[in-house]
């Protein structure tokens, strides 16, 4: 039995590792189209206002050390990320620029990834250093940017690995769905770092006060869930986010599970290519946008198939075969923003058609597809020189929800952001609170940033969680109760915590020191 | 690596002729009866500025103790001629230091003196553009001694103007005009020194709502492309001793900037 569990665990870890790859290698391809577009673009005149005497190469970047300590037992260092990021901007020709961002991170602690990683099987941009220590290097973005005009329209063509950012909301993503996300640190990482850039082409055209943006990304990269052994692993009590592993009645309480490799759509195929557009215009003082995005969902759907299997001494029993899979979804949404007096009111919303939800119904493949409506409404207040305040209401609704869908039909969150601008914006205390209405749960993020000089900043802060175990935020307010960990999940033995089971309660205090630099030629 | 205004062989002759004309105009103006405050400010408003301007600026934020922070920006300005109710459009893109690099501020000033301006701010850390409320235009602009109201040009009809006196400022005869706001303003009044010959503003005293003198702005100008443009601005906060000095160089006039540059899209993608 132990051997079977070990084998099962190995498979699960393999799947989890594959989910956790931050830097899937990208194949060069479809270059012909890109070069043709580039040639056409270069034939057009550059945009007005371009300054031929600007530096041809700018280098900016920073060195940063980011150390966090667990506030609950075991009170140990949770991470010690030492990071260098380099950003290069090169003016290749009038209107043509090359942009690159590279990053290297060294964390001798490694609790954010899990302790028992098999480094030999990782992609080439991970390197083990001194046993359990590791270095991660990543080319975050690399693109050619062309600015020019065609007729009365101002155009921007961006080719390469890039981020596309939509929406207005703070802390949670509604329309900001184009790039997959790294959830290794739940939603605590800065958005610019947690978005996973994609390779493709994007065209922006501005004409007659209207912006049209269209893009196509032939590359598929999945969002990265936290490893089951890592600090921010999802709690098995959280409904709907992990495989639905209802006990098979014929087998009593015994659930045999086999988790297959994640099936990712292959990149550089027409059927895989994601695409979308955004139309934006300001009408009578209101910024409006219409957004459409058609892509494979970056989060996996866990398909289930029950097959008979023979186990030693038990005879044939139902085997729960779980296959992480990705389904095509289409999101149609929009946003608005307007200001009055000292307030800015904004909102965004979208319906995603075809989203897959885990179901407890044993008759199907474990997944049902439903539309999901998500929206956010926010109010900014800038009435004082010293204080910026923002409140948000964020909701999600699964349309035509049935009882067998594991995830709750409604999710409502409200948030509050208060930021003080002291000493000419060199001392910035801040509090961000995200409150989950249905589960009475919260995440609190107090911090204070001190910009000691133009180059050096120090940030002190904490990330705190409270709420019930089955809440999205509350799951991190509890020790992992091994007795509650189903046998079917990728943990070694139910009821017995080992090194493979994270201790839970990853609330933390942190200190971050960043030194920035720049240069130009 | 900053660009400089192009110089030609004819420039010294042009400048000499302009100086002679301005001197003659100043002499005539000194003999004429004083204009009304509104007439002076209408002349300021009608002063040629070109269709658009591009410039590089270095901002020195200087504490009372003498410690200094430096920001570099590239500034874009365009006369919108009232199209769609917009008087002028201004775009400021931060180039340095790294922690504020690519932060960008866009403002569309309302043609209607009582109308609401529209402002947007691009935050590179979020890669998002956020609309900013303009109800209280007295908020500091990114930690400087300038507030948002100082960065947009108030229309003559937005204030009641009173001609106070004529006196010299930086060696130039100036009309001193007191302007009390008729529309939203963070100040109770402004006292402005308007150059008699060129109609550029050489100094502004800003009075807080409570009535006390809060800040003083002094401005140096230079002729570029046939129009007068800022060369140096110094805003001194008399309450806390902090001051902001802006050195402007490389100004170019009539570069061909169109309305498509002054959009939320430019904030996201970077200036041309």
Image (cartoon, coloured by chain):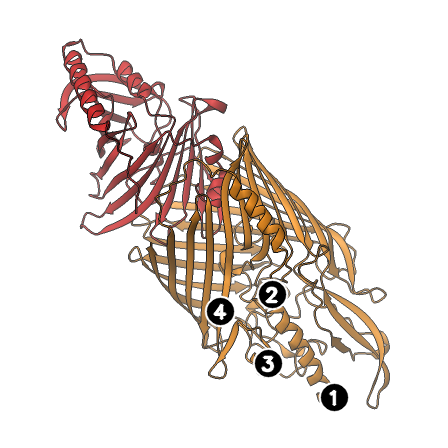
Image coords of residue B189 (percent x, y): 27, 26
Tell me the CA gap for discs 3 and 2. 19 Å
Q: Residue at x 26, y 50 (%)?
A: B69
Relative to A302, is A92 on the left or the right?
left
Q: Is residue A195 above or below residue B15?
A: below
Q: Please report whichever mark, 1 or 2, sits nearer to the chain's N-terminal start.
A: 1
Which label is found at residue A128? none
**Given the image, what chain letter belongs to the residue carrying mark 3?**
A
Label pair 4/2, CB-CB below 8 angstroms: no
Is residue A377 in sight in this rendering? no
Residue B20 is left or right of residue A55, and the answer is left
Mark 4: few/some/many CA within 10 Å (<14, 14-19, 20+): some
Residue wearing tag 1? A1
Residue A278 position in % (x across, y down): 61, 42
Q: Measured along the vertical axis of the image, is residue B138 above or below residue B58?
A: above
Query: Contact (CB < 8 A) between labels 1 and 2?
Result: no
Q: Nearer the viewer, residue B56 or A349?
A: B56
Q: Earlier in the sequence, mark 4 or mark 2?
A: 4
Q: Chain of mark 4?
A: A
Q: CA distance from mark 4 to mark 2?
A: 17 Å
Q: Are marks 1 and 3 on the same chain?
A: yes
A344 is higher (above) or lower (below) than A188: above
Q: Both on one chain, marks 4 and 3?
A: yes
Q: Which residue is mark 3?
A: A500
């Amino acid at each position: 039995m132990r051997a079977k569990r070990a084998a099962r665990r190995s498979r699960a870890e393999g799947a989890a590792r594959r989910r956790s790859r931050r830097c899937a290698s990208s194949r060069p391809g479809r270059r012909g189209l890109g070069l043709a577009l580039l040639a056409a673009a270069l034939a057009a005149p550059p945009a007005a206002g371009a300054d031929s005497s600007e530096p041809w190469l700018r280098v900016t970047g920073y060195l940063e050390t980011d150390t966090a300590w667990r506030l609950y037992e075991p009170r140990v260092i949770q991470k010690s990320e030492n990071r260098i990021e380099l950003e290069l901007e090169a003016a290749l020709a009038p209107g043509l620029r090359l942009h690159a961002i590279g990053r290297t991170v060294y964390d001798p602690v490694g609790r954010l990834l899990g302790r028992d990683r098999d480094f030999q099987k990782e992609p080439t941009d991970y390197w083990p250093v001194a046993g359990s220590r590791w270095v991660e290097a990543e080319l975050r973005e690399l693109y050619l940017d062309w600015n020019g005009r065609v007729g009365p329209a101002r155009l921007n063509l961006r080719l390469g690995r890039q981020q596309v950012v939509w929406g207005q909301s703070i802390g949670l993503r509604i329309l900001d769905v184009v790039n997959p996300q790294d959830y290794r640190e739940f939603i605590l990482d800065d958005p610019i770092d947690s978005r996973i850039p994609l390779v493709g082409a994007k065209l922006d055209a501005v004409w007659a006060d209207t912006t049209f943006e269209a893009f196509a990304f032939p590359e598929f990269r999945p969002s990265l869930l936290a490893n089951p052994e890592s600090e921010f692993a999802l709690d098995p009590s959280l409904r709907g986010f992990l495989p639905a592993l209802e006990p098979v009645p014929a087998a009593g309480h015994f659930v045999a599970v086999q988790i297959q490799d994640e099936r990712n759509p292959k990149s550089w195929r027409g059927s895989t290519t994601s695409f979308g557009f955004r139309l934006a215009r300001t009408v009578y003082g209101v910024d409006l946008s219409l957004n459409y995005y058609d892509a494979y969902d970056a989060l996996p759907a866990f398909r289930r198939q029950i097959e008979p299997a023979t186990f030693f001494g038990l005879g044939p029993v139902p085997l729960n075969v779980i296959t992480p899979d990705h389904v095509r979804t289409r999101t149609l949404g929009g946003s608005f923003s307007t200001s009055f007096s000292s307030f800015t009111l904004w909102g965004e919303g979208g319906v995603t058609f075809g989203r897959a939800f885990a179901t407890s119904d044993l008759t199907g493949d474990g997944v049902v597809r439903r539309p999901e409506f998500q929206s956010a409404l926010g109010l900014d207040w800038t009435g004082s020189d010293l204080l910026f305040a923002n409140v948000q209401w964020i909701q999600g609704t699964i349309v035509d929800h049935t009882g067998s869908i594991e995830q709750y039909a409604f999710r409502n969150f409200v948030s509050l952001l208060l930021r003080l601008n002291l000493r000419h914006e060199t001392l910035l205390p801040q509090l961000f609170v995200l409150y989950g209405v249905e589960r009475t749960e919260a995440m609190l993020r107090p911090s204070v940033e001190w910009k000691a000089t133009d180059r050096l900043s120090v940030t002190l802060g904490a990330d705190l969680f409270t709420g019930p175990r089955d809440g999205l935020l509350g799951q991190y307010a509890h020790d992992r109760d091994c007795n509650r960990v189903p046998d079917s999940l990728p943990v070694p033995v139910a009821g017995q915590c080992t090194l493979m089971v994270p201790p839970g309660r990853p609330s933390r205090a942190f200190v971050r020191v960043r030194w920035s630099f720049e240069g130009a030629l | 690596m900053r660009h400089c205004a192009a110089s030609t062989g004819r420039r010294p002759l042009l400048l000499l002729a302009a100086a002679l004309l301005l001197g003659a105009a100043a002499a005539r103006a000194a003999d004429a009866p004083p204009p009304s405050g509104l007439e002076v400010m209408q002349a300021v408003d009608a002063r040629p500025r070109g269709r658009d301007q591009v410039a590089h600026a270095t901002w020195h934020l200087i504490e009372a103790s003498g410690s200094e922070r430096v920001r570099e920006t590239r500034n874009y300005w365009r006369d919108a001629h009232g199209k769609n109710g917009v008087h002028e459009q201004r775009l400021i893109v931060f180039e340095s230091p790294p922690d504020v690099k690519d932060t960008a501020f866009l403002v569309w000033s309302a043609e209607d003196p009582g109308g609401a301006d529209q402002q947007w701010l691009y935050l590179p850390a979020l890669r998002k553009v956020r609309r900013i409320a303009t109800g209280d235009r007295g908020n500091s602009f990114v930690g400087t001694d300038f507030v948002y109201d100082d960065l947009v040009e108030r229309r003559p009809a937005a204030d009641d103007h009173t001609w106070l006196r004529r006196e010299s400022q930086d060696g130039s005869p100036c009309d001193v005009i007191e302007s009390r706001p008729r529309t939203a303003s963070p100040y109770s009044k402004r006292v402005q020194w308007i150059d008699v010959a060129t109609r550029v503003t050489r100094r502004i005293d800003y009075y807080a709502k409570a009535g006390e003198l809060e800040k003083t702005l002094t401005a140096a100008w230079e002729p570029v492309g046939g129009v007068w443009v800022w060369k140096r601005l110094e805003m001194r906060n008399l309450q806390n001793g902090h001051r902001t000095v802006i050195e402007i160089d490389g100004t170019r006039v009539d570069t061909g900037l169109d309305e498509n540059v002054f959009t939320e899209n430019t904030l996201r993608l970077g200036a041309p």
